[in-house]
Amino acid sequence: MKGLLPALNRLMPLMMVIFLILASIQMAISLHLSLASVGHFMKWCAPAWPVLAAAGSILTISGLLFEARAERLARKGLLRQQGWIMDILSRLTNRNALEEMLAREQRETSLDAEELAANLRARVIGQDQVCEDIAAQLRRRLALQVRGKPVGIFLLAGPPGTGKTYLAKQMAQQLERPLLHFDMTQMSDPHAATQLFGSPKGYVGSDTYGKLTGGLKEKPDAVVLLDEIEKAHPDVFKKFLTAWNDGHITEASTGQQVSTVRAIFVLTSNIATEALTEIADRLHDDPDRMRAESVEALRQAGFAAEVLNRLDRIFVFRALKGLDIARVAALEIETMIEGYGLKIEVGGIDPTLLMDVMRRQIRMGDGASARDLVRSIEDMISESLIVARQQGARMVTIDRAEDGTITARTADNNPNSTSSHARLMP
């Protein structure tokens, strides 16, 4: 269709000549003119035919040349304009990265909360309500066109080992955002703020940006994970207030303000574990009241009031129970073994071992996590895993004997297979 229209435009003069001839014949028929009278008229006009033919030919050729030149100039101008635009993007920036960021921003403004919640629930065990709530919050906040503060400042509170840190990592992955992860237990000293916000001029380290300011300068849309925020020094807390109130943080070495309005801040805390667990169990059907009582419990436990006042939302994680503990332990064991370059055979984790983990979790209470118990298993079988990898094994199984001995065996029918025996203490 695109090629047909230009062709018709070029043939338009010729079509007009044909139309005039047909119109003349039709007029002659309508006037009942004989061929003799028409021939007489043609002879009478004979001296004018060459002039009319020449004029018609000139007009036809001129029209065709004008159409061809106009089309050529239009095409040349369009291509030149496109080439200039493309040259700017490819010469001055990473065009592919720009297109990816634009596509991601468009996806975020129309975030599907149900899909995000489903993806988070599939990965974070035992915290379905939290996954749904945080997905709904993100959908509303990412849809805002004008912001003077970060996208969100969320606190994930609850017992250790319940998936708080893991949820933050999965959230960053699902949103396709970079993750800036900071262990706030290392920020208990007042001078630790320089690690995040840089050092003033004249001090050691003033030639480099802080980890947080530098990270947000390069990745302004990052998910900033502040693990165990309650263990940070109050002076470090105060530095974050500007980021949350005014939408920027200041790099100490240069005085440059780094925007935080596109970032998502996720704080985790293990404070007031027993109180929060009781509140979550008692009010799991009333999320609004649960959040209100959780804020009061955190305040009574000594959580910084200035931080609580600036949180957009608090999500309370419930303690894992029953098979959820076994699921987490199984995933932790699988991750641990993959760290040695090996794989767990299907059905390769002895269920009695997972039952032991569940019993110990119940016995030790909220102070212990499945991750801690898996670390003790790793201490027992790590040597055999190293030997198995050196011998070329790919698959292993983890067995538990009646006396509590844990055994790691290769599952490749390797004649040089190895095993390690250790006992998981009650």
Image (spheres, grey):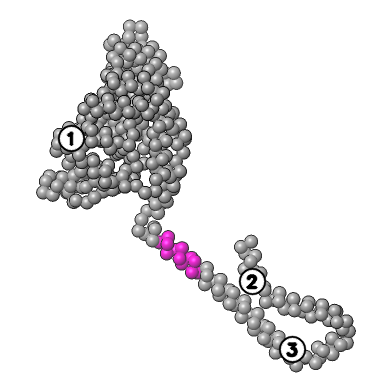
Residue designated by label 3 = 49
Residue 227 lies, in percent from the top left, at 27, 32
Q: Amino acid at mark 1?
A: Pro
Mark yes or no: residue 355 visible.
yes
Query: Gap between marks 1 and 2, in whole Å?
Result: 78 Å
Q: Is residue 176 magenta?
A: no
Q: Callout 1: 10 Å neighbours few (<14), some, many (20+)? A: some
Q: Which residue does the image show at 18% across and 35% down from the upper left? A: 234
Residue 42 lies, in percent from the top left, at 81, 88
Q: Is residue 29 above or below residue 186?
A: below
Residue range in magenta is 76-87
SS majority, magenta: helix
Residue designated by label 2 = 9
Instruction: Nearest to the eye among marks 1 and 2: give it.
Output: 1
Q: Is residue 233 above or below residue 364?
A: below
Instruction: Look at the numbered disc 2 and give the secondary structure of its residue.
Output: helix
Q: Counting residues from the N terminus, which is met first, the one under dot 1 or under dot 3?
A: 3
Mark yes or no: residue 374 visible.
no
Instruction: Look at the numbered disc 3 and give the secondary structure of its residue.
Output: helix
Residue 389 lies, in percent from the top left, at 34, 25
